[in-house]
Amino acid sequence: MNQQIADIALMMVLPLGITFTAILMTAAAETRTQKMAGAFLSFLIVVMDCIFYFAKNSFIAYNCDGGLLLSFASLFFFAIIGMVRSDDLASKFGNGFFAFFMLSAFMGIAYWDRPTFIPTSDYSPSEIAAMNAQYQDYIASFSDSDAGSAQGKARVRAVAVPANGGQKARDDGSLSRLESYLVDAETAIKRMTDITNSIDDFDPLPSNVSESEREKRSSQALAINNNAVALNKKVLGLFHPHESSEAHADLIQASECVRLAAYALYNYTLQENPEQQLILYRQSRDQIGQMKIYLKRFWNGIEVLQSNNQLQNEK
């Protein structure tokens, strides 16, 4: 229910409300120039709305994040309309600053780690559509723990489940979500291990390294760094059950340590000062040690969750 309210507010009410307000402001303009400029800017807002609603996931992700992105873009043009309609200099400057801030918000969300603005995202439109569908299934699993299928939902509506049966269904749904999350987490941890092995296998640079050799080694370190950044984004986007939030936070910290270790290694290959090289190399090694600590905490948290689920099932 909460997610439905968010969808309605951010994907329907807010963008369309801004659009209708802009059209009303244009209609209330006093001069012909103001009406023409307002009509053109309002037309751009309507075009963005049509792209969002009718060409889903083509330029803007069709979800709450996309609704926010659309709203900030509409507010940018809305502020320009206000600036055109303003007569005094103070109002023009105020609307200009407002337009600048809305454009800043738009750029911030467009380059967010979460895929929102397709042209600046690493994901294709089909991948974003699949992620949206996966997220909707994830949300639906909380309200209907019976596997989320159409048959399961019909069965839940048709049959009155006893209190203990409903509790068992919720426990099974929670366990299923945790197991699904662990599959993704283990895949991410395997990638962490591969990256740390690559860092471990990266031999120190000789003191008399040539420029060509330095360039070659820095390219290798850059590839490791790019893999670590991609892994960090992957871990940040993992869907996890609410009860595993603390454990997932440790997994995020572990992936961040891998990213910092790879980044320090890349800077190490670019550094020519031996003292700075030593500092960066130690930083890389220290971050790997921190990663192991966070992974141990992650597995301890998962073991506690699994033990709690087992005790609930036994009861």
Image: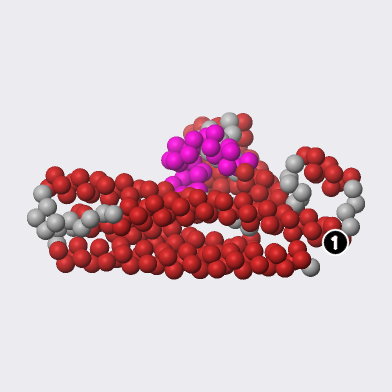
Q: Is residue 53 left or right of residue 196?
A: right
Q: Name the residue type under label 1.
A: Asn
Tell me where residue 172 appears, x and y as whole percent: 74, 55
Residue 240 location, quadrant:
bottom right
Q: Residue at x 19, y 62 (%)?
A: 277
Tell me where residue 228 appears, x and y as whole percent: 38, 52
As rendered, which of 89 and 114 lies closer to the eye?
114
Does residue 120 show up magenta in the picture?
yes
Tell me where residue 179 appears, x and y as whole percent: 63, 54
Could one spot residue 1 in this view of the protein?
A: no
Tell me where residue 249 appears, x and y as whole percent: 52, 63
Q: Quadrant of the C terminus?
A: bottom right
As rendered, which of 276 and 96 lies closer to the eye?
276
Residue 283 location, quadrant:
bottom left
Residue pointed to by mark 1:
164
Secondary structure beneath label 1: helix
**Which residue range is magenta in the image?**
109-133
Q: Residue at x 47, y 55 (%)?
A: 189
Q: Relative to 303, does residue 201 appear above or below in the rendering?
A: above
Q: Is residue 205 left or right of residue 18?
A: left
Could one spot residue 285 in this view of the protein?
A: yes
Q: Relative to 140, does residue 40 appear above or below in the rendering?
A: above
Which colour assignment does the render follow?
secondary structure
